[in-house]
Image (cartoon, helix red, strand yellow):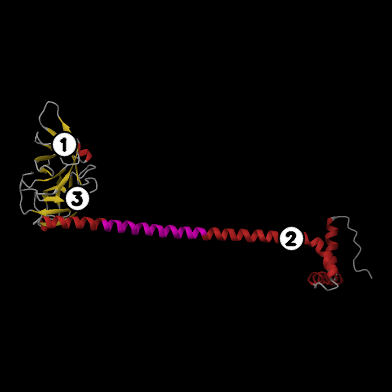
Amino acid sequence: MCWFPQIKADNVEEGVYLLRRLFENKVFIISLVVVLLFVLAALTAGEDSKLNVVRNILSVPLNPLQKGIKTAGDKIKDTINFFRDVRKAREENIELKRKLSEAERELEKVYRLEKENENLKKLLSFKEQFAQEMVGCNVTSIDPGNWYEIFTIDRGSKDGISVNDPVINANGLVGRVSRVDLLSSKVVSIIDTESSVSARLSKSRDLVILRGDAQLRTEGLCRLDYIPPDVEVSVGDKVETSGMSSLYPKGVIIGEIIQVVKNEGQFDYYAIVKPAVDFRRLEEVAVIKMGQEGEGNQ
């Protein structure tokens, strides 16, 4: 008995039809299943099995296919692991950046607190130096310009502030109160052209006058006038308030001399002073409550 019908196909449609008829043949299907089971048994047989010969024969054509499948599988696995590692690294990078940002903010906060603590210690030393009461203030606004020539503080008459009260910070003399409102006040700094301060040379103890200058103020500097002709001043000499007027208390540091200018043919000369206060970065100041009002600016 012939299991397979005789195939004589002259075209594709005839071949498809015959193939369909072939798979409808139960004997063919049973035979195909038996062959597949035999192949499977041969491939999984032990080393001592008689089917081992068949397995060896089948492994020859199947070996390259198995290697190809294994290689492709390994590459797919490596690719999946690579993208998994990339995603994990990206997530770890984002987390590290977040932690770094938090650490930088905390470091800035610590630095700011240390700076504020240092300034408070200096102001406390000033407070011990002067008998007058001091009021801490925040700078809230400045008049147009890059320098704090005239600015506003957040304390006023309600806090006992008066016109002409001296203003200092942790580094030295800032200026004086020029106008007082209920909750705020205006301050004129020592670099303003309308400002003058009775000062003293710390080394020689000679009296001089510190003024604001139209040209020097753009650099945050002041001019020192009325230097006695017989007094030698040098770069680095300190300048402080003299206490000879009723406006500023004695001994408040003003700054240091950075240049001496001698006029040829004249007996007098002047010097350029760099204030101890940085007038480009004022944030907190203190007002010394002198308990008076007046028009003088000495």
Q: Residues within 10 Å of mark 1 (few under 14, many from 20)?
A: many
Q: Where's residue 291, x and y in %? A: 6, 54
- The residue tagged 3 is 171
Q: Main secondary structure of the magenta part?
A: helix
Q: Looking at numbered disc 1 in the image, what kind of residue is underneath it?
A: Ala
Residue at 23%, 58% (x, y): give it: 117
In terms of sequence position, does the residue under pointer 1 or pointer 2 come before the other? Answer: 2
Residue at 86%, 55% (x, y): give it: 11
Badge 2 marks a residue whose secondary structure is helix
Q: Residues within 10 Å of mark 3 (few under 14, many from 20)?
A: some
Closer-to-camera residue (204/253): 204
Residue 5 versus residue 291 in the image, above or below: below
Specify whether residue 104 is painted magenta: yes
Q: CA distance from mark 2 to mark 3?
A: 80 Å
- What is the quadrant of residue 62 in the picture? bottom right
Screen quadrant of the N terminus: bottom right
In terms of sequence position, does the residue under pointer 2 or pointer 3 come before the other? Answer: 2
Q: CA distance from mark 1 to mark 2?
A: 91 Å
Q: Can you tell which of label 2 and label 3 is closer to the viewer? A: 3
Q: CA distance from mark 3 to mark 1?
A: 21 Å
Give the magenta range. Answer: 89-114
Q: Where's residue 67, x and y in %? A: 74, 60
Give the number of the disc on residue 271.
1
> Can you see residue 216?
yes
Q: How many marks?
A: 3
Give the number of the disc on residue 67.
2
